[in-house]
Amino acid sequence: MKRIAIVGAGIGGLTLAHALKEHFAVTVFEKGRGAGGRMSTRREGRYAFDHGAQSFTVRTRAFADWLEPLRHRNLVEEWRGPLVTLSHGKVLGPRRSNETHYVAVPGMNAIAKALADGVDLRSGVDVAPITSQSGPHTLLDTEGTVLGDFDLVVSASVARHARMLFPAAGKDTPFMTDVAMRPCHALMVAFDQPWTEDWIAARIIDGPLDWLSVDSTKPGRDRSVTTFVAQTKSDWSRHHVDIAAPNLAPLLYAALKASLPVDLPEAALLKAHRWGAAFTDMRQRSGPWLDTTQGLAATGDWTATNRIEDICLSALALAERIKAA
């Protein structure tokens, strides 16, 4: 059976692995401690935060069909409630949305866990650059440990990581173009009281923050507490990359309190996280890349858009091309 290595266990890499696991011997390598990427959930004691993607929408029949088994298992549900716009401590008015917003249950990482089921997933592994010109490739980690021989190696990460992993891929490959990535900071706040307002999320006009989700209003969450995830405007994050971590959370929390129309109780937990490559500025979407001669392939948000649906569909399209090759 052909052996395939997927480097990156975000939602794209896991979608690809799930689609290929019945046809090939698939191994997923992840540099970080866990899987999910932007579909991660951070747990701090009794509190949980979806500190990456807050929700997702469905615009195509293909994605709706792909989600159906997850919905049947009650791992995906609609997140319903009013959205508002905030500015200088006031609610400017409701925000209208023509799309249904979905979340994973009980946390956004539930989809990643479901996709990883039955997949050989190896976390904490930093794969070294591949210098061979064609497969099979002998993968090594950055300390020189042999990870195995693979007929096809797939980068499922940002374009910069694909360039680092495949330095000999050729200058005409789509990820060799410099793809600008925009950062984002996420503020996580918890309170030991339930949320009493009727709205579930807000666009914030003033200050460094762009979006606030009341995470505890999502289906399957603990509603006896209130959990916030507030995300910054990308321009602000780009100009404040050097703020020390201990100073970041208090700074963003002060901005949040200034934007909210309600008085907050004492925070039970206050944390911040920096996403260095949250969004891509690439305008021309290349689609997934596959070179069967070199035994290399790549997918990621740079091949589609930042939307969860498009990342998954790009991975599924690559899976079909691999199976047909």
Image (spheres, helix red, strand yellow):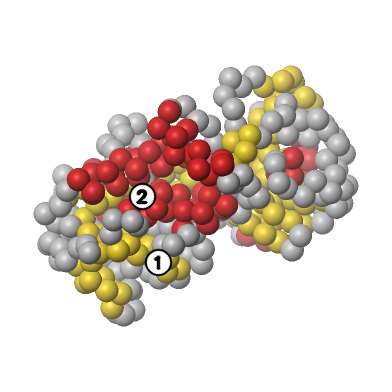
Amino acid type at mark 1: Asp
Binning the other alpha carbons within 10 Å of mark 1 as few (below 14), some (14 to 19) or many (20 upward) gives some
Amino acid type at mark 2: Ala
| As drawn, 139 above or below 37 | below
| As drawn, 175 above or below 201 | below
Foreground: 234 or 201?
201
Residue 59: in sight, yes or no?
A: yes
Residue 50: in sight, yes or no?
A: no
Q: Is residue 79 left or right of residue 27?
A: right
Residue 69 position within the rendered picture, expressed as x and y whole percent measured from the top left: 50, 43
Q: Mark 2 points at which residue?
A: 19
Residue 195: image quadrant is: top right
Foreground: 13 or 49?
13
> What SS does tag 2 mark?
helix
Q: State the mark number for residue 4.
A: none
Q: In which quarter of the image is the N terminus?
A: bottom left
Residue 302: image quadrant is: top left
Residue pictured at 30% horizontal, 63% vertical: 25
Residue pictured at 78% horizontal, 34% vertical: 260
Residue pictured at 74% horizontal, 56% vertical: 47
